[in-house]
Image (tube, helix red, strand yellow):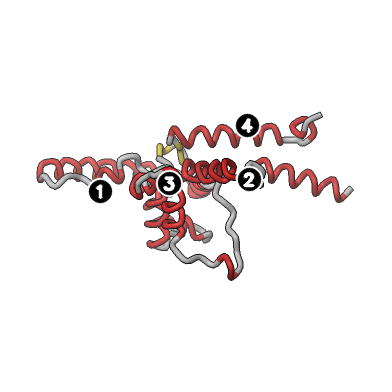
């Protein structure tokens, strides 16, 4: 009998993890029915610099939720990086204003609790494969976590800084995990959803 047969919910958790990892390559997500793209490393650095409550662990403010959803609109960076030509710039600006008004109307029609629940589900999917941090003085960081990631992937694959900054974060984390397994097939493997189910099951056995 396998663990999937023994542990309630374990098979479903493994299937969910596989689904989330595949969706990272498609870069298609929803938050309360609103189409959004995956966070990138560049997005995270911008959000951390702006002290967004969406990533701080605090109760997110309505303003930060709205700004977060606006940043994740598929055309956000294209609008921000529009060409210098006045006619093109004016057209892009008009499209941006129109899209912002549409998003604002949709947010006003939603229930805050439902938005936060959907937002948390999205973040769980994005950070599913985030490597565990190592603490202690000997492991004190000597560079930005953004630099450590870009350096690691650039050194391994030869990718450019910009391509790594713009890559969907779930894909970045999967590459890091795969590099570790390629270098050391015996490296510990972690799966947040299924490991949580398995851990709860083992704890329940120890209580009996």
Q: Position of residue 35 (x, y in %)?
A: 40, 37
Callout 2: SS:
helix
In this orientation, which residue lies closer to the viewer: 146 or 83? 146
- Residue at numbered disc 3: 39
Q: Residue at x 44, y 32 (%)?
A: 26
CA gap, disc 4 to disc 2? 13 Å
- Residue at numbered disc 2: 192
- Residue at numbered disc 4: 15
Mark 1 residue crowding within 10 angstroms, few (<14) / some (14–19) / many (20+): few
Q: Residue at x 40, y 40 (%)?
A: 37
- In the picture, the disc for residue 80 is 1
In the image: residue 80, left or right of residue 179 = left
| Disc on the earlier residue, 1 or 4 | 4
Tell me, yes or no, whether the two marked residues, 1 and 4, touch with CB atoms within 8 Å: no
Q: Position of residue 51 (x, y in %)?
A: 42, 63
Callout 4: SS:
helix
């Amino acid at each position: 009998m396998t663990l999937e047969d023994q542990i309630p919910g374990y098979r479903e958790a493994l299937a969910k993890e596989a689904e989330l990892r595949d969706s990272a390559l498609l870069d298609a997500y929803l938050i309360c029915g609103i189409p959004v793209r995956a966070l990138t490393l560049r997005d995270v650095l911008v959000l951390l610099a702006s002290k967004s409550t969406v990533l701080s662990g605090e109760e997110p403010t309505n303003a930060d939720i709205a700004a977060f959803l606006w940043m994740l609109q598929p055309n956000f960076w294209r609008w921000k990086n529009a060409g210098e030509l006045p006619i093109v710039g004016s057209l892009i600006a008009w499209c941006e204003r129109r899209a912002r008004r549409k998003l604002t109307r949709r947010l006003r029609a939603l229930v805050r609790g439902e938005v936060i629940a959907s937002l948390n589900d999205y973040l769980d999917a994005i950070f599913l494969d985030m490597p565990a941090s190592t603490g202690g003085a000997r492991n004190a960081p000597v560079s930005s976590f953004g630099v450590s990631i870009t350096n690691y992937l650039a050194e391994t694959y030869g990718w450019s800084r910009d391509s790594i900054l713009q890559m969907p974060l779930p894909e970045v984390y999967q590459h890091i995990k795969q590099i570790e397994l390629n270098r050391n097939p015996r490296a510990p493997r972690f799966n947040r959803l299924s490991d949580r189910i398995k851990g709860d099951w083992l704890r329940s056995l120890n209580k009996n």
